[in-house]
Image (cartoon, rainbow, N blue to C red):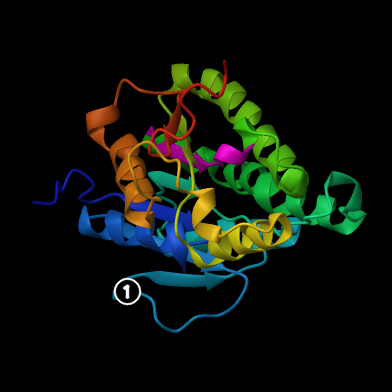
Amino acid sequence: MVNNSLQGKNALVTGGTRGIGASIVARLLAGGATVVTTSRTPVDNLPAGVHYIQADLGTPEGATRLGEETLRHFDGKLDILINNAASSEAYPAGAGSIPDDAWQSSLDLSYLSAVRVTSRLLPSLLTARGAIVNISSAVTLEVVPALAHYAAAKAALEKYSQTLAAELAPQGVRLNVVIPGNVVTPGADKIRQDLADAAGIPVEAITAGTPLGRAGIPTDIAAAVAFLVSDQAEWITGTQLLVDGGASVGLAA
């Protein structure tokens, strides 16, 4: 049975038209929230009731427009912000082969989009004593030269989130990070295939060692996000929640 603890809440999910983002949108809707989402490329197959805004969050202008249109749609009231927008491409030849524009685009979309959107919407979130969840990646816990640019952007997002969480807590806004592991999505599947091809191994080998016995699915991440933005997590802020089937166990050692 779905917990309707999000009834009456207004939420924005960036990058919410496929993969993890789409699953987060669906979970928030099921919990009773009203949802706005966005992507760079127009879509026409969103769930009923979702308000869509096309915006390129890799640019300051796109983030500003998204913030303004979101507040206009919600009459200025925003309770939940999920910064999920990100994009990456693997460079199997290693970190030294990653071109400058890939570094810049990764920083712009996978890190600075969250900073820009949050800054624009923060006054409304402060009024609502709302909740923010930033979506990172378990690639920050490993050394993956082919994804060095993406790992750097997500590591920056994690540090930014930790700092902002401490700043906002006394004002009643909670900010947490969810760190997905190997999750089956179109984008992640392509990256895994590229890395497997470069290494000459079956793609299944990349997720074969997951302690809980399977790769993740988007609903695994959406469930964690829905919990963190709900009243059930009202005493949780500044956390980095790993959702990876146990794959990261022992990495720090």
Say above or below: 228 vs 106.
above
Residue furthest bottom in the image = 44
Say which amino acid is labelled 1.
Pro
Tell me how many marks there are: 1
The percent position of residue 209, horizontal first and vertical second, equals 45, 41
> Which of the two residues, 69 or 22, is positioned nearer the viewer here?
22
Which residue does the image show at 65% across and 40% down from the upper left?
154
Question: Would residue 132 be counted in the magenta stretch?
Answer: yes
**Does 196 sit above or below residue 166?**
below
Q: x, y percentage for residue 10? A: 35, 53
Q: Quadrant of residue 80?
A: top left
Judge whether residue 194 is colored magenta.
no
What residue is shown at x 46% (from left), y 35% (from top)?
247
The magenta segment is: 129-139
- The secondary element bearing badge 1 is classed as loop
Residue 174 falls in image quadrant: top left
Question: Quadrant location of residue 140?
Answer: top right
Along the viewing direction, whichever of 187 and 83 lies nearer the viewer: 187
Q: Residue at x 35, y 23 (%)?
A: 236
Which residue is the extreme one toward the left? 1
Looking at the rendering, in which quadrant would you find the C terminus?
Answer: top right
Residue placed most toward the observer, 98 or 133? 98
Give how far across and how far down residue 2 sits, in percent.
Answer: 13, 51
Instruction: Return the residue at label 1.
Output: 47
Question: Where does the image place residue 233, in percent across and percent down from the top left?
Answer: 28, 28
Label 1 neighbourhood size at 10 Å, few (<14), some (14-19), many (20+)?
Answer: few
Q: Is residue 119 left or right of residue 12?
A: right
Q: State the residue at coordinates (27%, 38%).
A: 230
